[in-house]
Amino acid sequence: MRITVSHNKTPAEIKANIDRSFDDIFKGLPMGPVQISEEHRTWVGDTMNFSFHAKAAFIAVPVKGWIAVEPAQVTIEVELPSFLKNFLPEEKVKTAVESRIRGLLT
């Protein structure tokens, strides 16, 4: 799932906002409150590679992806396990993540 959101801040500001609020981007997914564990983040230039386990109710799933900060936009690629689509429509996840990213960029 890929999400692209435009912004008007410097890449340094965006990276700082993402670092500070990374967990909040994914905690409010439409499957209820999410606990994040085994989180790993690494910046390589203006791209953050990430992975973590997201636990909601009785399900714990691995999530990985990257966030690329460009001068006028942020692109997020999130890889969710395919079986999760049976429980949670990808469009709902995409809408929730996009909304949280827009909140970080304002």
Image: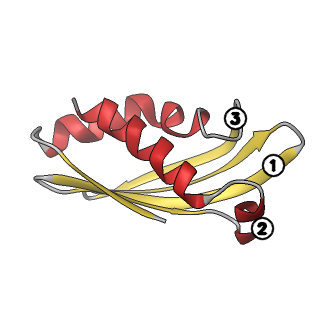
Q: Residue at x 53, y 57 (%)?
A: 91
First along the sequence among labels 2 and 3: 3
Q: Is residue 12 above or below residue 1?
A: above
The amino acid marked with disc number 1 is Ala
Q: Nearer the viewer, mark 2 or mark 3?
A: 2
Q: Rounded to the nearest whole Å, what is the CA distance between mark 2 and mark 1?
A: 12 Å
**Residue that carries the numbered disc 1 in the rendered image:** 60
Find residue 34 and name its label: 3
Q: Rounded to the nearest whole Å, what is the CA distance between mark 2 and mark 3?
A: 17 Å
- Nearest to the observer: residue 89 or residue 11: 89
Q: Rounded to the nearest whole Å, what is the CA distance between mark 3 and mark 1?
A: 9 Å
Q: Looking at the picture, how far across and down is residue 48, in whole percent? A: 39, 55
First along the sequence among labels 3 and 1: 3
Answer left or right for 65 relative to 76.
right
Q: Is residue 95 above or below residue 9?
A: below
The amino acid marked with disc number 2 is Phe
Q: Residue at x 63, y 63 (%)?
A: 80
**Disc 3 secondary structure class:** loop
**Disc 2 secondary structure class:** helix
